[in-house]
Amino acid sequence: MEKRKELFSGKAKSVYTTDDDNRYILLFRDDTSAFDGKKIEQLDRKGMVNNKFNAFIMEKLEKAGIETHFEQLLSDNETLVKKLEMMPIECVVRNISAGSICRRLGVEEGLEMTPPTFEFFLKNDELGDPMINEYHINTFGWAEAAHVERMKELTFQVNSVLKELFFQSDMLLVDHKLEFGLYEGRVILGDEFTPDGCRLWDKETRKKLDKDRFRQGLGGVVESYEEVGRRLGIDFGA
C-alpha cells in the first residue's frame, strides 16, 4: 500500500490518501491536546500506544459483529482504514457522570447512570463541539434520519461490548465518544477508540486512567494508557 498526500491533519492524527481510492492511512502522532486545542503537548510513545490500542479495540468490535473502518496495522504508528463519508457528529454515551455533564447539569462526579445517557455533539472545534439534537441534524442536513437511528443503535452496541471488556479487566468505562461514516451506503464505525476519546477508571480505586490525566495535570498520561492496554492483554513492545 503506497502512502500518498496528507489529506487532513487533526489534533492527534493525520489522514493520508493511498494508491487505493477506497483506503486511507491514519498516522497516530504523539501530539496531545485538550480544551479545543488550548493545551497542547507532545508525549513520547503516545502515537504508537494509541495506534495499537485502537487496533485491538476495533478487532474486538469486529468479532462482536460491529463493522468498523479498521483494516490492518501497517506500522507502530500507522493503520490502514476504509475511506468513509464521515458525518460531522459525535455520539456520546455516559455510564457514570463525569466531565461536561457535571458542569452542565450540576450533578456530582461518579454517579451511576441507569440507563446510560446518550448525547449528540457537532464536530466543530471552532465552535467548541456544541451539543445538538436530532432536530438540528435534520434541519441542517448533517445526516439522514435512518443513519441517525443506526448511529444510536451501534453506539449502544459498542457500549455494551466495551463496558464488559473493561470490567473484566477491573476497569469502568465511564463514557466515550464515537464517530461514524458511510461505506457503500452502510453506517460503520470510524475514527478511533483510545483513552483520548473515553474515560476509564480503575474499578476499585476509581483512579483515572485516561486523557483526564492530561486535562487535569495529573501526569503519567502515556503510562496510564499503557496500563489500560496491559490489563487488556495488548503488547506494546519494549
Image (spheres, rainbow, N blue to C red):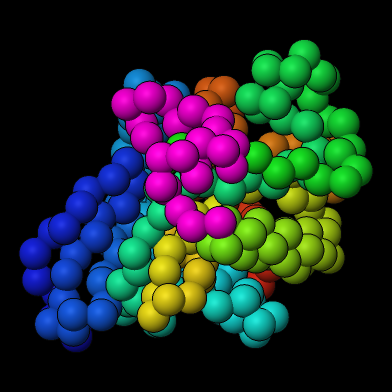
Residue 222 makes an appearance in the image: yes
Where residue 95 sits: x, y (%)? 79, 44
Q: Residue at x 17, y 70 (%)?
A: 17
Residue 86 image position (x, y, % from top left): 37, 59
Q: Residue at x 13, y 59 (%)?
A: 6
The quarter of the picture where residue 191 lies is: bottom left
- Confirm whether the magenta stretch covers residue 97: no
* Front residue (pair 60, 139): 139
Q: Is residue 69 left or right of residue 92?
A: left
Viewer-proximal residue, 96 or 74? Answer: 96
Q: Is residue 69 left or right of residue 209?
A: left
**Quadrant of the snapshot with the N terminus:** bottom left
Residue 31 location in percent, x, y? Answer: 32, 42
Q: Quadrant of the C terminus?
A: bottom left
Residue in view at x 89 percent, y 38 percent: 112
Q: Is residue 130 magenta?
A: yes
In the rendered image, residue 61, in percent from the top left (x then y), is placed at 63, 75
Could you say which quadrant of the image residue 154 lies in?
Answer: bottom right
Residue at the image position 9 percent from the left and 71 percent from the top: 4
> Is 203 left or right of 130, judged from the image as shown?
right
Q: Which residues are magenta?
A: 124-145
